Image (cartoon, rainbow, N blue to C red):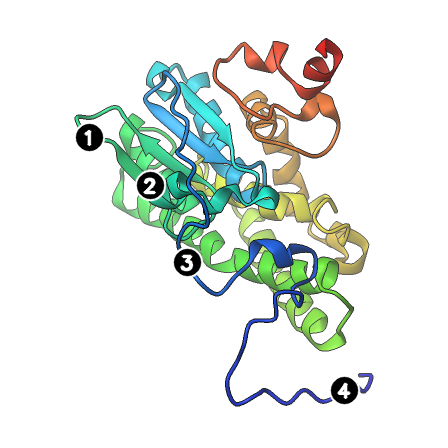
Amino acid sequence: MTDAPAYVPPKVWTWNKENGGKFASINRPIAGPTHDKPLKVGRHPLQLYSLGTPNGVKVTILLEELLALGHAGAEYDAWLINIGDGDQFGSGFVAANPNSKIPALVDHSGPEPIRIFESGAIMIHLAEKFGAFLPTEPAARAECLSWLFWQMGSAPFLGGGFGHFYAYAPYKMEYPIDRYAMEVKRQMDVLDRRLGETAFVAGDEYTIADMAIWPWYGGMAKGLLYEAGEFLSVQDYKNVIRWTDAIGARPAVKRGRMVNRVFGEPSSQLRERHEASDFDTKTQDKVEAAK
């Protein structure tokens, strides 16, 4: 390991606004809104406020899968929350999610609106609401929820840990990259061993656990996250790759990963989604062509 300048923590930590790498402008040590901006509300009972990151994609995949099953009540409006522009610190979004992280869902189907934040909580709410993708038999339900919360607890190592230091930190540091790479590979091995036993993560049925894990670990298995596939030897996780390809081929998954997307090919970006027909008429390539 190479020598690095010794860092001596100060007696009292202070916030250096410039010391945050690519995402310095969106992280801060305090909560609450920075500006007044009410949330828009469309005509559907389900109002999603999100961005097409792995955490946001979990929810739009589930909503599209519910619609594919024929649950008309799962129709939704998906509003773009651009974290690079600070939309997550607007007063309306903070009211929906005091943690100022995407996604947030407001369910207007009852007598009073219900706010749900944290992607796992949103997925459980929707799965229970429509009686789909979450087993009701106790053992199967416990297995599904265990893997769902495995993803919720593990993703910070994959994103905020490995992703930050490998791809986004102001400069490369051997120790944190090595530490988090080891943890990501351990997680990939956990998942690969499980998928060597079952078709899907929680067993023989496709569930919200698959939808939650796929955007993160499927992206890593295909070398898409942080362009770190070669570095982590992702080709070794053959069961994860098999599972990733099977889920990625689902039409609802293809649609879900387009919603609130602001990167990639313009034809893959549906920045806001208000009707099913938007996938045919309002992708970014068509929006730009119409200007």
Residue 251 on image: x %, y %: 58, 21
**Residue 1 visible, this angle:** yes
Give the position of the C terminus as an image quadrant.
top right
The relative height of residue 235 versus residue 37 in the rendered view (above or below) is below
Which dot marks residue 191?
none
Q: Quadrant of residue 23?
A: bottom right
Residue position marked by numbered label 2 in the rendering: 116
Q: Relative to the observer, which residue lies in front, 198 or 75?
A: 75
What residue appears at the point 54 percent right and 24 percent down from the top-left corner? 272
Q: Relative to the observer, which residue lies in front, 45 or 181?
A: 45
Which dot marks residue 31?
3
Amino acid carrying label 2: it is Ile
Q: Residue furthest left?
A: 111
Residue position marked by numbered label 1 in the rendering: 112
Mark 4 falls on what kind of element?
Answer: loop
Residue position marked by numbered label 4 in the rendering: 5
